[in-house]
Amino acid sequence: MFYVPLKLRERNGPTPTKGPDFSKAKPLRINIAGTEISLRAPKNSSPIDYAYPRQEAAPYYDLPDAPDHTPYKDKWYCDLTDEERKEQDQYNMAKPPRLRIQNDGAPGWNIQVLTGRAWDFYGPWFSGALATVHMTLLVTREVPHRTGSYFNPRVLEMAVMDHLAEGFTMRGQQEYWSTPEEWQPLDRFPCPAVSYISRIQDKPMISPDYEDEYEVVFPIRDDILIRIHLEFRRKHRWLPDGSDFEDIEKWTSSEPMRTLIKQIIDSVEVKLSPESQAQLERAQAGLTDTALTKDFAPIDIEAYRRNKAELAEAAQRQADAETTEKEIQPEFPDGIEQDAGKGA
C-alpha cells in the first residue's frame, strides 16, 4: 500500500491512514526567561493553511517587562556616530525576542503564538490526504489580570473555565460553547498543569467538521499561561443520496490522529526558572491542597456566564454605592464633628 500525498482517485470504502513517524520526532525546546519547555513534534508535513499558524519558535524569549539595555536608546539613530550605530546594531541583532502577548484571543485574553505545525495523514493507493493534525503553542495572559496567581490550582481552574466560557462558535444566531472533558491533571509537572479535551456542546447542530480539540495548560509566571492546542480535521463525504454526511469514523478512523496527539502531550516537559519557582512557592504557601481537582463535573456554560455576569454587576453596584456614600459624607473642620457629637 502506498501512502503518498498525491490524490489520483476517489476512495470507495473505508480506508486506513498513515501520518508522520513519531519515533523520528526531534525535541522542540523553548526557553522563556529561564523556564524551559520541551516537547517532541515531527516536522511540518502539510501544505500551508492560513487558517492555522505555521511558524517555528525562537529558542529564547524575554518577558514583556524585561529591562531594555539597548545602548544609546535615548538618542535618535541618525544622531549616532558610526561606532555607536555599530554597537547598537550588534546588540539588536544578538538580543532575544521579547514576548509581546498582544494579539486578541477570546474576549479578555491576549495571546502570542510561539510555534505552529501541521501533519497530514494519507490514505492508500493515491487517495491523498484524508486528515490533518494541527498543533499551536501559545502564550496567554488575561486583561486585566485576575486576583491571585495561576500557580494556585483553584485560580488555574477558574482561568481555564473562564477561557472556555469566553470562546464560542456561532451557528446562525445561536452560540455554542466547548466544555472540558477527559480532564487529567499532569502530576509529573513541577507546577499545576492539566490536559483535557475541549468538546463542543451540541456538536451535531453545528457541523460534522468540528472534532475534539486537545489542550495542555500550565503557568510559567503568576500571570502568564502556556497553552498547547492540538486538533485534527478529517475530510467528510456526502452519502450517495446527498441527505447527510457519511459516518466518518467508519471511513477514516480518528485513532491514528489521537495517537499522535497523545504522544506529543506525553512528551511535554517543563523546568521552572528560579524566579518562577519562587512565585509558585509564594502562591502555594499555606495551602492545604495544592493539587488540581481530579474530576471536572459537567458545566452549563450559559448558566456559568450568566451567574458570572450577575456577580460582576452586583460587585459593581456595591462599589458604586460605596463611592457615592463617600462622596456625600459631610466633612467637618477639625474638632467640629466631635463637638457636634457631644451636643447630641
Image (cartoon, rainbow, N blue to C red):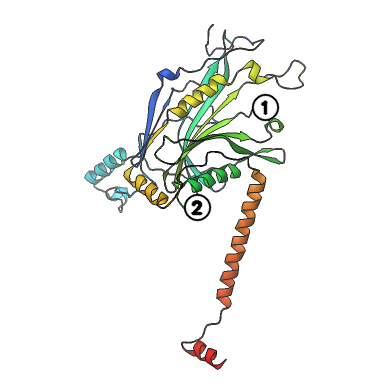
Q: Of the residues under marks 1 and 2, which one precedes in the sequence? A: 2
Name the residue type under label 2.
Answer: Arg
| Image position, residue 79 (x, y; %) | 28, 50
Cβ atoms at labels 1 and 2 below 8 Å apart? no
Kindly tell me whether residue 97 is visible in this rendering. yes
Q: Quadrant of the N terminus?
A: top right
Q: Nearer the viewer, mark 1 or mark 2?
A: 2
| Image position, residue 159 (x, y; %) | 52, 46
Count how many numbered circles sit on residues in the image: 2
User: In the image as oriented, which residue stretches furthest toward the left?
Assistant: 83
Q: Against 247, is 159 above or below?
A: below
Residue at image position (62%, 9%) is: 9
Name the residue type under label 1.
Answer: Pro
SS state under label 1: loop
Q: Against 81, is 344 above or below?
A: below
| Image position, residue 198 (x, y; %) | 58, 35
Locate residue 180 relative to residue 286 in the image: left or right. Answer: right
Kindly tell me whether residue 106 is visible in this rendering. no
Report which residue position mark 1 lands on: 208
Locate residue 33 relative to residue 218 in the image: left or right. Answer: left
Locate residue 77 relative to residue 142 in the image: left or right. Answer: left
Quadrant position of residue 323: bottom right
User: In the image as oriented, which residue stretches furthest toward the bottom?
Assistant: 343
Report which residue position mark 2 lands on: 146
Quadrant position of residue 132: top right
